[in-house]
Image (spheres, rainbow, N blue to C red):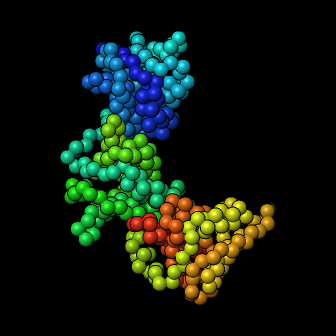
Amino acid sequence: MTIKFEASKENLLYSLSLLQNIAGKKGTLAILSNILIKSQGNNVELIATDLEIGIKNELDANIISQGSITLPAKILYELVKESCSDFISIEEQDNYWVKIVSGTSVYNLAGISSEEYPDFPEYNEDMLVDVKANLFKELIDKTLFSIAHDRENNFTLTGALLEKEQIDNNNYIRMVSSDGHRLSIKQTMIEDDLSTLNIDKNTIIPRKGILEIRKLCETSENDNIKIGFDNKQLVVKSNNSLMIIRLMNGDFPDYKNLLKIINRKNSIEVERKTFLESLRRTNLFTESIFNAVHLNIQKNIMILSSQNTDYGSATDKITIEYEGETLALGFNCKYFIEAIQVMSSEFINIYINSEQSPCLIEGKDDIGFVNIIMPMKI
């Protein structure tokens, strides 16, 4: 039986947008550039996979006849996006051709048999636990920026570590990321029982999967999502969407030793917004490769300076609260900016033991968040 259904442009475009980063790219299997469209009860399911991440989205539709077909993801998305009609009809024809009608426009699009499409992974519904979408998104927002983009010598740094821990009878989920030069940690308390959440010591989610989860959380911000782990895969479920992500193999570095060597007694307190604006100004004159900024820290004063062989130099002075010895050290300015801009505290504390030691950043209103940046020679 051939599939035929009608759906609103708004709903169809939204569903297709969720699948674009997974399908639509040329790979070893041509059919992975397609999305699977199939009727399921009174709804239509749209499915995309790259064999590492699979996404299934339910679409409200008027189903005229049941069936399934696969269609090129990118052209279908662009076609629906440019449609001038509020409703779109999709009907399978002979030899896997599909007729798409939008107002006075008619399109004939070549499809591929749904039988060639990979099976969607199975999972155990009982293992899922509820998590507030906005809380999980915050875990991602405060760690995403320090995930390594390319790390041949330690592949696991191209993902984020997820941990669970019980502290004072409260359940916490923690996300950790590092690119070898900085470390971000964010933990949040979860009301649900986490005993069924099968997180081991090396539950590492790939960066691409993190980005897709963030997108799903954005669309469910005021609701709960369900998460679970089964057979080295992460399951994330919202009202209309299901995502299954293959976890990474390997060992995440032992980051807790780094936390132990930082003494929190030598503290610099600075207004977050003032420091962020100063960093952005100073960063205009850093070299693009290293983004090096020099920090000269004296009693109640911080002097930021940078130099660029093409443009010149910059110096900026801000007021801080600091009573320790004078420090002169260098850091990647971009690392400071990316950490501080995701924080919300009015004032932040920066802990630096010496000119050769890493610095730790935290703020009292950014509960459960810590960022560590390694110094650089300049």
Residue at image location 34% in from the left, 31% down from the top: 58
The quadrant in which the C terminus is found is bottom right
Furthest residue toward front: 346
Is residue 354 in sight in this rendering? Answer: yes
**Which of 153 and 102 lies nearest the eye of the viewer?**
102
The N terminus sits in image quarter: top left
Residue 169 image-quadrant placement: bottom left
Instruction: Locate residue 236: give its quadrant.
Output: top left
Q: Position of residue 377 (x, y in %)?
A: 64, 76
Task: Please provide percent x and percent y for residue 148.
Answer: 51, 58
Of 40 and 166, nearer the camera is 166
Name the one closer to the observer, 52 or 101: 101
In front of the other: 142 or 36: 142
Q: Give the farthest residue toward the bottom.
A: 325
Q: Specify whether 280 is left or right of 213.
A: right
Residue 342 lies, with reference to residue 217, above or below; the image says: below
Percent x, y for residue 82? Answer: 55, 24
Question: From this viewpoint, is residue 206 visible?
Answer: no
Task: Locate residue 241, reporting x and y percent.
Answer: 35, 38
248, above or below 303, in the image: above
Q: Residue at x 38, y 53 (%)?
A: 136
| Residue displayed at 79% across by 66% down | 312
Q: Is residue 339 above or below residue 330?
A: above
- Residue drawn where x is 51% and y is 80% of the image: 267
Please give left or right for residue 206 compared with residue 82 in the image: left
- In the image, 57: left or right of 358? left
Count of labels in the image: 0
